[in-house]
Structures are given as C-alpha cells and as structure tokens.
Image: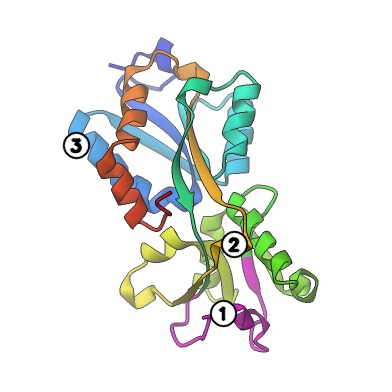
C-alpha cells in the first residue's frame, strides 16, 4: 500500500505520474499491464516536458516523472526535487516527418519545399524535446530561414500531431511512436528522419522526492525496466539502444 504521507497521492494504492506527450500511446498499455499485475491504480497527466517540469517545480503532486529528455530530470535532481539514484533512460525517441495524406510523397527533405505545403508543424522547442529535435533537423538541412514563415508550433507533440491530422498543417515533425499508434486508415505517409540530423532523444524517468519510500512507485519504475516492457517500448517506435 502506498500511504498518503509517504507518496503524496490523493488516495492509497494510487500513483500519479507525469508523462511526456510522445509516450501517451505506449503508456496507456503499460498502465493496463501494471494495474493487471499489481491491482494498483495509476493516474497519468500528459503534457510537454517543459510544462510538466514547471508544474513539478510549483508543487504539483506527481510522484514519478517520465520526461522526453534527460535535462529536466537532471535539473529536478539539482533542485533537490528528485532522487538521483532512481533516474534511468526508459526510451530513446525517433523523429518522423508526417503527412495525414497517404498520397503525399514525404520520402526525403524535398517534401518540405513542395509549393503546396503552406504550414509545417513542430512542437515548441522551448517546451518539448521533440520540437528541439525538429529545429535541429531544419538547421542541419539549412532550411530554417527558408521555412520560417511556414512554421506553426504546438505546445506539445500531441498538439503538433493534431495540427496535421486536422489539415491545418500539411506536414509535421512528430514522434514515430505516435504514427505507429494510428489506425491503418489514418496512418498517412511519413519519412523517418535520419538519426544523424538531430541529437539523440534520450528520455529519462525519475522518482520525485515527495514519493521517497513509496513502494508502489519503486515497483512501477522496476516494472519499466523489465525485459518485456523494454521490448514493448522498442516495438512502439523507440530506438533499442
């Protein structure tokens, strides 16, 4: 049992986890697996890593943080808000250029220069690591200045996907895991961005200090590191490295 005084949770046997938006699809399945195995309840809040980081600093009652980068968990440790011994990399993200139109040719960077592309969506680089990666890609391709007037930013990677799904943007840089979670009829077309065009998206998990001593929290972090869950995460659109 995970007591309130130890874990800062609203009720006993309930975890409250802050999770970066790119990991929403895999997390839903992992929650189901963990709840079935243990009988514990998990509540998840999704958002950009930057927004979740700010909420944690402001006292939000999260117990575990699954970020889309390594920087924010490290900063929480430096601030005395997270346990350094608990930190580990749970996923390594992949970036794709995606169109909701399966007929659109997006097999290389030239797709960005197509005259019928009015808007290109990416997550806000100040808040979302996948947005930072997308900006790095444009810099590496020497297209940042050329395309600056066509960029529309989502607060997080989930909103970025919605911009493209709705047709408000013709192309968008999103997480490969998001594209794999789409149904076949909505899969669209995508280009897996070569890994050398952006810095690795190492995604770290960390136990927050308000949850020190919480057995269920420790169990969940251990669960994430099991071979079965790591294989599932890899199959969900993340690099196995």
Q: Which residue is mark 1?
A: 108
Mark 2 to mark 3 CA distance (whole Å): 39 Å
Residue 196's label in the rendered image is 2
Magenta region includes residue 109: yes
Residue 112, image x and y in percent?
64, 79
The kind of secondary structure the magenta stretch mainly shows is: loop
Is 40 positioned to the left or the right of 55 in the image? left
Q: Which residue is mark 3?
A: 36
Q: Is residue 23 above or below residue 62?
A: below
Q: Residue at x 70, y 71 (%)?
A: 141
Residue 208, image x and y in percent?
50, 23
Q: Is residue 239 above or below residue 98?
A: above
Is 6 positioned to the left or the right of 156 in the image? left
Q: What range is drawn magenta here? A: 99-121
Magenta region includes residue 117: yes
Q: For this rendering, which residue is in front, 70 or 57?
A: 70
């Amino acid at each position: 049992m995970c007591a309130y005084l130890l874990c800062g949770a609203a009720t006993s046997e309930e975890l409250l986890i802050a999770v970066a938006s790119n990991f929403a699809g895999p997390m839903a399945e992992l929650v189901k697996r963990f709840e079935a195995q243990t009988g514990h309840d998990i509540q998840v809040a999704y958002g950009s890593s930057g927004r979740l980081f700010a909420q944690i600093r402001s006292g939000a009652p999260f117990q575990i943080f699954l970020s889309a980068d390594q920087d924010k968990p490290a900063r929480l440790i430096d601030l005395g808000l997270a346990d350094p011994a608990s930190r580990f990399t749970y996923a390594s993200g992949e970036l794709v250029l995606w169109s909701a139109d399966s007929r659109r040719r997006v097999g290389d960077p030239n797709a960005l220069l197509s005259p019928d592309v009015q808007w290109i969506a990416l997550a806000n680089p100040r808040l979302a690591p996948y947005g930072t990666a997308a900006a790095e890609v444009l810099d590496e391709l020497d297209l940042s200045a050329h395309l600056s007037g066509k960029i529309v930013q989502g607060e997080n990677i989930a909103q970025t996907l919605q911009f493209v799904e709705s047709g408000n943007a013709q192309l968008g840089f999103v997480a490969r895991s998001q594209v794999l979670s789409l149904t076949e009829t909505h899969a669209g077309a995508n280009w897996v961005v070569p890994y050398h065009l952006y810095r690795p998206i190492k995604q770290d998990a960390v136990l927050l200090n308000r949850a020190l001593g919480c057995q269920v929290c420790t169990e969940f972090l251990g669960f994430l590191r099991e071979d079965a869950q790591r294989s599932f995460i890899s199959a969900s659109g993340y690099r196995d490295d």
